[in-house]
Amino acid sequence: MELSVAQWLLVVCLVAFPLLYEWSVSFKYFCKMAFYNGWILTLAILAIPICAVRGRNVENMKVLQFMLLHIKYLYGIKIEVRGWENFNIKEPYVVVSNHQSSLDLLGMMEILPSRCVPIAKRELMYAGTAGLACWLAGVIFINRKKTDDAISVMTEAADTMLKEDVRVWVFPEGTRNHSGSLLPFKRGAFHLAVQAQVPVIPVVMSSYKDFYCKKEKKFTTGKCTVRILPGVHTKGLSSDDVPELADRVRDMMIEAFTQISSERPGKGPGVMH
Ligand SMILES: CCCCCCCCCCCCCCC(=O)SCCNC(=O)CCNC(=O)[C@H](O)C(C)(C)COP(=O)(O)OP(=O)(O)OC[C@H]1O[C@@H](n2cnc3c(N)ncnc32)[C@H](O)[C@@H]1OP(=O)(O)O
Ligand SMILES: CCCCCCCC/C=C\CCCCCCCC(=O)OC[C@@H](O)COP(=O)(O)O
């Protein structure tokens, strides 16, 4: 039987792809990351019409959360959550969390409180279907290149939080960080909490180093611990207190990060999902 060039190519791809996937750690990394982004863009196609019925609304965040929750199973990532009780606050609050990678989305969706929207860089708004889904879910976009614009968007957010009973999730490092610790914090999240006079709730995701490393192109199955820390109150604080508040919260988060990242997999209390 003679094979055409196209058939040969197909055979080579069908054989080469699984072999490469099995043998090459980097190839596996690229495939997994490409699928991660591609799958999110695809899910967003489904989410958009559902969200569009309500228009731009923070309740749509629940739709995105529901659609993204299964991804941890596809990637074999176990997420253990500790400190759920610290979210038992009826009033609005500002969640601050560490930012290692776009995989943070998994930990975020695992625990996302109701009526809680993230603050994201403006570029995400142009990420095709994902950008539109984010916009419909009320994600707050800031232009990091224009500090004044970003500050005025955040000041407006302080008002919205109180008027519309909304919680806000901020990554105070301001960018992804794989260094194994936390970058110095930008102060926007803390100004926001002080302006609205609402608590800051720190959330810490343990280091991904055992299963994910962008530099080494490693992406295996693994476990991540997410710890919700007790809220830090801001009642009576003014903008002068922001630097001290930001430092205090960062210290708490570094301590928690070091502790949960140094535990051996499978040890420690918590609820496994
Ligand atoms: C079905 C599936 C669909 C798809 C679903 C996908 C869902 C995805 C959602 C997840 C999105 C996650 C995205 C994550 C990100 O994009 S992280 C990047 C963006 N986030 C941030 O940058 C937040 C943190 N940044 C800040 O808080 C900054 O401070 C900022 C406000 C942006 C300004 O930054 P910068 O220009 O670098 O300036 P400084 O930080 O140096 O600040 C300058 C001085 O201004 C003071 N300041 C800051 N904020 C305020 C404020 N609100 N009010 C008053 N003053 C403020 C700050 O303190 C500085 O002054 P001093 O130096 O302290 O005197
Ligand atoms: C037609 C356009 C197609 C665009 C394709 C875009 C591909 C992206 C697709 C899906 C995005 C998945 C959503 C992941 C959300 C995670 C957001 C994130 O982690 O952003 C990084 C940001 O915090 C900090 O950025 P930098 O580290 O400063 O950089």
Image (cartoon, grey):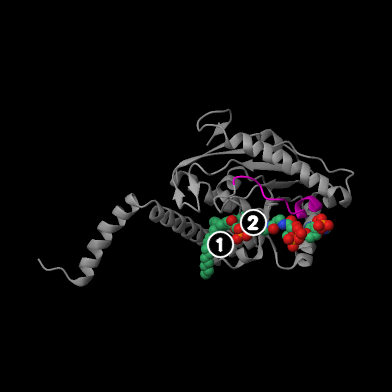
Q: Nearer the viewer, residue 223 or 115?
A: 223
Q: Secondary structure at mark 2?
A: loop
Question: Viewed as shown, does residue 223 lie left or right of 138?
Answer: left
Mark 2 CB lies closer than 8 A to ligand 2: yes
Residue at 50% of width from left, 33% of height from top? 265
- In the image, taking residue 175 as reference, residue 272 lies left or right, namely left
Give the residue furthest to the left: 1
Quadrant in which the N terminus is drawn: bottom left
Which residue corresponds to mark 2? 175
Tell which of 144 and 230 is nearer to you. Answer: 144
Quadrant in the rendering for residue 110: top right
**Residue range highlighted in magenta:** 180-192
Mark 1 neighbour class, 10 Å CA radius: few under 14, some 14 to 19, many 20 or more: many
- Mark found first going from the N terminus, 1 or 2: 1
Q: At 66% from the left edge and 34% from the top edge, which residue is drawn?
A: 83
Q: Say which of marks 1 and 2 sits in front.
A: 2
Disc 1 residue lies near ligand 1 with CB under 8 A: yes
State whether residue 90 is above or below residue 20: above
Residue 240: where, in percent of width, then height?
Answer: 88, 50
Identity, as a three-letter code, of the amino acid under mark 2:
Thr
Report if residue 263 is visible in the image: yes
50, above or below 258, in the image: below
Q: Position of residue 219 (x, y in %)?
A: 45, 48
Ligand 2 is found in the corner quadrant, namely bottom right
Q: Residue at x 82, y 45 (%)?
A: 244
- The answer to whether one can see residue 227 in this image is no
From the image, tell me which residue sits under label 1: 130
Query: Residue 213's x, y, as percent?
Result: 50, 49
